[in-house]
Structures are given as structure tokens and as C-alpha cells.
């Protein structure tokens, strides 16, 4: 017997027995028995495990907790069906339009563009009111919240029973969401708000047990913050944040404004870059941090977030100057000469980390060419080995691109058989509307140089920029989520040539988007993001927002 992905139940059982995590004891009476928790953060958008590949590569990937968690998320509807007795369908609660929440992160700053919040779920098949989201905030100093943690995520609607975490829903354990008299709806609760001396402009990373979160501030201090375990209490507020229980490590050197930390769960080491081209390694990042080591990867040029292939022990990191570098994870020495990507030799042409497929040892870099007139949007594929970085095919958008080109996403088929799957990304276009592009793969997998299809983005104009793309399959419905980075930006989903939006505008557009689950409970199956502008949750406030997936279908 097999799961929908063609994986035998013996393999499923081996995964669950071998990689089940040591879980905190959330009071989740709706999910008796063993539970498998799931972390979703920026690293899952940039390190993936495609289908195919060598047997050696697949075995190595199976040892990676991110690979196991991504596999579980992709089989979530099937796992839910087994739990529900074989009802394998979408879990979206389509009965009526659900009202979602927008919670203030303060008036100083919010989640930065292209960065992500992080989510911890206590169970792969059941939503819990103790599940929580961590939002990084571009604010720091006395009285300003730098980290905001929300629980009671599945609150919403205007009645006590509309959301599973609303006040008055006595069948649900954990904390209850507060009632916002200003909007007449229930919303998530600020469980903890912490102040740091300096702002956080990058994405957080969670430990596998959800007990700690790692962030780096703008002056290169790495903060290991302990997340509370008691959901019956609160810890500070956005207006009056608390001081966290933390261990901090000064990395020294220049600013750190573009690189999020990446933790290699197999070794415990964290990697992060600074704005002057230096890559740092922090051993035992979620324990007692060891001695920090560093090496200059691209002198004088900001490093974007590093991505670690733990099986090969190599770090792939892009620079804002248009390079992709392959670095040894142990010594931080370059394993090969950095590649100049897409004829791009100036600052700002690459704004996002690479999309790395560890299963097929491929890295995809998104950007705009500088040394061509006009500039063009592109995606360039590289394959890599222990000491070699090799350029493969490039897709050239063929039109001028002034605004940034952000990371794309694979569809669900790619994770089973890459030659039947596609890569999607958005091409800002000069003098015409912006397009969503779909690109296929030949055997290898090798990116085809031409687009299979393209679609005009609704509400877009010349040079429209979008957030990074996030893909999620709920039951049989495989969708890509994004927002337009406009003054009145909207959030959209895309599937099969069709676009949908909930219609709400978010000033400036949104950060990167996190999708949580495919379960049936009220106000679960949602997406989360921060707003890049103010106003969606009160005048002058940046916001943390939840939308149910059904409102985008």
C-alpha cells in the first residue's frame, strides 16, 4: 500500500519512527496519541527536495529533518484522510466567507520585504490553539517590540464559535483569541512580545522542538530566544514589550540587514552573512553557542541568506552583487570560484537567496541582468558537487526589468517527477503588464530555456513587483500564493491559469507568505504574512495578517 506520492507505507512508518521529534507537551486533547510537529519558516521556501535524483541523494535527503517535514506536509491531506477514515478531500471550510484577522506589530516597522514569519504546529493533522507564529519586526530599542509571537491563530469571525480558538469555545484547549471591539471580530492573541536593542530586518528560524527561535539583528548580534511554554500567561505586549530570556552572540563586523540565519539541524551550526561579504558559522546555535568562525566570501558586497545542503556539507549563498558561491560548511572556504550569474555585475540585481533542490543538487538563482540593455529578468540553473559549481540553462524573460525579480516556486509534480513538473516565477516587464511564467524540465532535471506558458497578473502594470512565491497543495488543489507590492497591494492565489483574490488591500503589499496546514477545523488552513505598509490594523500600524485559504480559491 502506498501514499499518493508513491511512497510505501513501510517507508512512511520508517520516517515517522526514525524522525519523530521530541515534542513539547501542548495541551491538545483533540489529537490524542503520538503527534508529529512541523516547523515552517523561510528555509523551507529555499531548500527543497525534488523527485528523481540518485539513490544516494534520496537516502541522504531522508536523513534531513526538513526533507521529512516537507514530505509530511505534502502528504498532509492523505495523512488526514487516514485519521478521518479515508475522507481524502480539501479541508477548507467552504460554507461561508470567513473573516480573518490583522494584528498590530507597532508603528515603527513590520516584517521586511522578501522576509518571512515562522510557524510552529504541534501536529501535522490537527490544529491546536497552542500553535504559534513568530513575526520579526524592523524595530528595536527601549519600548519597541522586535519579536512578536502570536497564538490562538485559528480565531476569527464575529461569534464565540466561529473560530476554534475564539473565546467561549470551551471544547478547544489552550489560550483563547481576544475579541476586537473595533472590528467586531475575534483575532489571534499576542502571546509574547520582546524588545531587542536593535531591529530585526531578516527572517527567524525555529528549533525543531519549538522551544527556541534564532534571529540576527541589524548590527550582527545573533539572538537565541527561549519561547515560553505556558499558554495560560502572556509575556509583554506590542506597546510594552518584555525582555526575552536569551543568549546573544556578537558576530562583529559590518551590518547584517539582508541575511537570515540558516541552521543545519544535522550539526546544530547556524550560518549567516553580513553586508560586507563575510559568512559566519556559529556552532551549537540552539544550545550553548561555540566559537564563531568566519570567512570573506565576496569582499565588500552584501551576502543574502545562506542555504545549507547538509548531506553534502556545502553552503550556497548569493550576493547582492550578482554572484552564487559554493562554500565548505566546515571551514567556510570557497569550494569553487563564485559564479557571476546572469551577466549581473552590480549591486541590487539579485535580492533573494537561491532556490536549492538538494535531492538533485541544483540551485536556481532569480534576478535581472545588468550588463545587457535593456535589463532582463532571468532564472539561472546551476548544478553543484563537493568542489564544482556548473552553469546549466538560463531562462531569459526577454523584456526590461527595473524592479526586483524574486524567488519562484516549483509545483507539486516536481517533487515526484521533475520532468512532469514546472518552475513558476514572475517577470516584471517594461511597457507592459507583469507576467507569471511557467518553465518545464528535461531529464536531469535541466531547466528548459523557453517558457511553457505565461499569464498576465491581474491588477498589474508595467514593472509590477510581487512578493516571493509560495506553493502549497491542499488535497488536489495545488496553488501559488503571492502579493503585488503596490500601495494598495492585494494577495492572490494562482492555479491552472486562474487567479483568485480575497479582495482586501494591504498597503505596500506583503512579506513572504507562510502556509500552515490542510486540516478541517474552523479558521485553520490559512496563510500568514506581514504588511509592508501601515493601515490594515489601525492607522499607522504595521500588521501581522491571517487569511484562510478558502478565501483565495
Image (cartoon, rainbow, N blue to C red):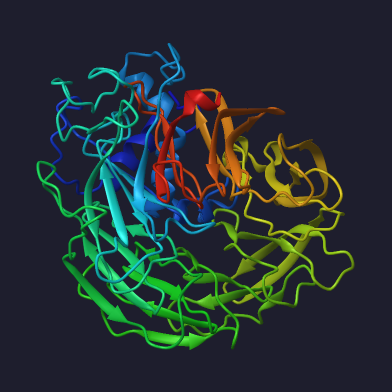
How far across and how far down the image is residue 195, in percent?
Answer: 25, 65
In the rendered picture of this protein, how many numbered marks are placed on residues?
0
Q: Outermost residue, right direction?
A: 373
How far across and how far down the image is residue 19, in percent?
Answer: 30, 47
Residue 202, by quadrant, is bottom left
Q: Looking at the image, is 44 positioned above or below residue 479?
A: below
How far across and how far down the image is residue 497, in percent?
Answer: 72, 28
Q: Nearer the viewer, residue 545 or 477?
A: 545
Quick check: can you spot residue 352?
A: yes
Q: Nearer the viewer, residue 240 or 270?
A: 240
| Residue name at image x 46 percent, y 80 percent | 255
Quick check: can you spot residue 5?
A: no
In the figure, is residue 12 to the left or right of 5? left
Q: Where does the N terminus fall, quadrant-wise?
A: top left
| Residue name at image x 77 percent, y 57 percent | 377
Q: Nearer the viewer, residue 503 or 28?
A: 503
Q: Looking at the image, is 129 positioned above or below residue 308?
A: above
Q: Where does the C terminus fall, quadrant-wise?
A: top right
Residue 515, by quadrant, is top left
In the figure, is residue 451 to the left or right of 379? right
In the figure, is residue 135 to the left or right of 323? left
In the figure, is residue 204 to the left or right of 257? left
How far across and how far down the image is residue 85, in percent?
Answer: 32, 13
Q: Nearer the viewer, residue 552 or 32?
A: 552
Q: Looking at the image, is 61 positioned above or below residue 188?
A: below
| Residue name at image x 72 percent, y 37 percent | 457
Amino acid at each position: 500500500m502506498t501514499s499518493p506520492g508513491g511512497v510505501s507505507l513501510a517507508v512512511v512508518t520508517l520516517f515517522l519512527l526514525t524522525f519523530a521529534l521530541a515534542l513539547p507537551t501542548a495541551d491538545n486533547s483533540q489529537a490524542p496519541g503520538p503527534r508529529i510537529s512541523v516547523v515552517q519558516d523561510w528555509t523551507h521556501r529555499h531548500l527543497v527536495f525534488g523527485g528523481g535524483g540518485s539513490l544516494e541523494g534520496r537516502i541522504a535527503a531522508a536523513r534531513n529533518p526538513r526533507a521529512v517535514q516537507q514530505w509530511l506536509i505534502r502528504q498532509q491531506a492523505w495523512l488526514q484522510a487516514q485519521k478521518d477514515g479515508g475522507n481524502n478531500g480539501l479541508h477548507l471550510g467552504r460554507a461561508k466567507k470567513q473573516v480573518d484577522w490583522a494584528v498590530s506589530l507597532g508603528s515603527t516597522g513590520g516584517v521586511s520585504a522578501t522576509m518571512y514569519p515562522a510557524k510552529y504546529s504541534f501536529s501535522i493533522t490537527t490544529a491546536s490553539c497552542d500553535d504559534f507564529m513568530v513575526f520579526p519586526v524592523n524595530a528595536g530599542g527601549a519600548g519597541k517590540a522586535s519579536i512578536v509571537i502570536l497564538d490562538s491563530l485559528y480565531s476569527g469571525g464575529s461569534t464565540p464559535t466561529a473560530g476554534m480558538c475564539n473565546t467561549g469555545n470551551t471544547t478547544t484547549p489552550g489560550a483563547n483569541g481576544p475579541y476586537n471591539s473595533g472590528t467586531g471580530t475575534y483575532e489571534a492573541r499576542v502571546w509574547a512580545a520582546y524588545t531587542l536593542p536593535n531591529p530585526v530586518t531578516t527572517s527567524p528560524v525555529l528549533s525543531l522542538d519549538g522551544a527556541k527561535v534564532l534571529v540576527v539583528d541589524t548590527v550582527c548580534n545573533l539572538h537565541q530566544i527561549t519561547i515560553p511554554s505556558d499558554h495560560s500567561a502572556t509575556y509583554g505586549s506590542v506597546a510594552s514589550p518584555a525582555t526575552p530570556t536569551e543568549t546573544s552572540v556578537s558576530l562583529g563586523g559590518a551590518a547584517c540587514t539582508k541575511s537570515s540565519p540558516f541552521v543545519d539541524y544535522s550539526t546544530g551550526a547556524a550560518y549567516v552573512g553580513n553586508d560586507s561579504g563575510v559568512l559566519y558559522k556559529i556552532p551549537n546555535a540552539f544550545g550553548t553557542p561555540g566559537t564563531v568562525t568566519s570567512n570573506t566570501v565576496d569582499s565588500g558586497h552584501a551576502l543574502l541568506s545562506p542555504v545549507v545542503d547538509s548531506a553534502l556539507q556545502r553552503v550556497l549563498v548569493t550576493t547582492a552583487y550578482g554572484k552564487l558561491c559554493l562554500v565548505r560548511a566546515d571551514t567556510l572556504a570557497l569550494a569553487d570560484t563564485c559564479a557571476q550569474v546572469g551577466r549581473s555585475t552590480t549591486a541590487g540585481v539579485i535580492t533573494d537567496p537561491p532556490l536549492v533542490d538538494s535531492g538533485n543538487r541544483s540551485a536556481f538563482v532569480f534576478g535581472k541582468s545588468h550588463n545587457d540593455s535593456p535589463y532582463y529578468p532571468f532564472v539561472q540553473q546551476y548544478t553543484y558537487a563537493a568542489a564544482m559549481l556548473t552553469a546549466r540553462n538560463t531562462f531569459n524573460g526577454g523584456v526590461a526589468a527595473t524592479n526586483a525579480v524574486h524567488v519562484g516556486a516549483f509545483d507539486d509534480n516536481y517533487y515526484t517527477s521533475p520532468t512532469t513538473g514546472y518552475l513558476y516565477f514572475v517577470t516584471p516587464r517594461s511597457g507592459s503588464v507583469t507576467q507569471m511564467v511557467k518553465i518545464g524540465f528535461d531529464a536531469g532535471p535541466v531547466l528548459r530555456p523557453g517558457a511553457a506558458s505565461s499569464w498576465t497578473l491581474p491588477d498589474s502594470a508595467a514593472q509590477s513587483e510581487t512578493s516571493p512565491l509560495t506553493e502549497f497543495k491542499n488535497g488536489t488543489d495545488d496553488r501559488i500564493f503571492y502579493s503585488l507590492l503596490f500601495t494598495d497591494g492585494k494577495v492572490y492565489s494562482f492555479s491552472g491559469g486562474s487567479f483568485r483574490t480575497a479582495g482586501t488591500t494591504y498597503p505596500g503589499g506583503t512579506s513572504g507568505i507562510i502556509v500552515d496546514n490542510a486540516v478541517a477545523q474552523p479558521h485553520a488552513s490559512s496563510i500568514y504574512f506581514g504588511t509592508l505598509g501601515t493601515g490594515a490594523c489601525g492607522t499607522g500600524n504595521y500588521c501581522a495578517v491571517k487569511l484562510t485559504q478558502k478565501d483565495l480559491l
